[in-house]
Image (spheres, grey):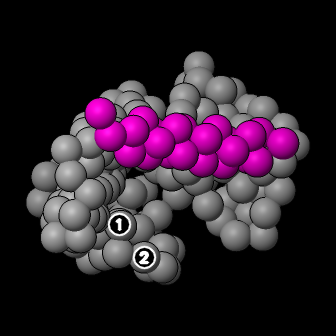
Amino acid sequence: MNPTPIIVALVLALAVIKEKSKWDAKTIDVMIFEDEEVRVVDLDTPKAFYLLGKVYVTTALLKRPEPELKASILHELGHKKWKHAEARLVFVLLASLPLGLSLEPAHLVKWLTFVLLGTIALSWLFELMADLYAAKHAGAEAVIAMLDSIKRTDHLHPPPKVRKWAVEHYY
């Protein structure tokens, strides 16, 4: 049996644990938001994120208008509710299983393409789901204000225009 899937799983697990430990170490405060623990990290960039059971916000985000802050936290709580980070890990782990069958370059290219496109598709779906969760609980206007303040830095998230369109047309 080829050990590659096990190696992929271990590397992925260690990377996630290291990332979570990094943010836990930078936590300067813990606040309670609607019975949920939210960790505060001292950063100049307004940002909120969910990582394996924990929601984090930066001190810069705490300075944003209350509706935008609430929408940001609720968006991350939507990720937590549906365990999006865990689902993404399961996807990559399951997608790694065929690596045990063949390490030929053609198979590796197909596998990498599948994992990359699958991860992007899941990320887009999960972002839209979290936006709609936030809109349901904070209101569409708050989510649209939150999305207006986002500067797109990657392609793992849908463009803010797409996300706003979904919120406007669903709520």
Classify 18 as above or below 159.
above
| Residue drawn at (26%, 48%) of the image | 99
* Residue type beneath disc 2: Asp
Three-letter code for the amino acid on which mark 1 is drawn: His
Q: Which residue is mark 1?
A: 157
Measured as percent of width and height from the top left, residue 109 is found at: 22, 70
Q: Residues within 10 Å of mark 1 (few under 14, many from 20)?
A: some
Q: Identify the disc placed on residue 154.
A: 2
Q: Are marks 1 and 2 in contact (CB under 8 Å)?
A: yes
Q: How many marks?
A: 2
- Residue at the farthest right position: 28
Which of 8/116 is in front? 8
Residue shown at the point (39%, 57%) measured from the top left: 143
- SS category of the residue bearing label 2: loop
Tell me the residue at 35%/67% (across/down): 156
Vertical relation: 11 (above or below) 155: above
Name the residue rendered at 54%, 45% in the picture: 11
For mark 2, does the 10 Å Cα neighbourhood hold few (<14), some (14 to 19), or many (20 or more) residues?
A: few
Q: Which residues are magenta?
A: 1-25
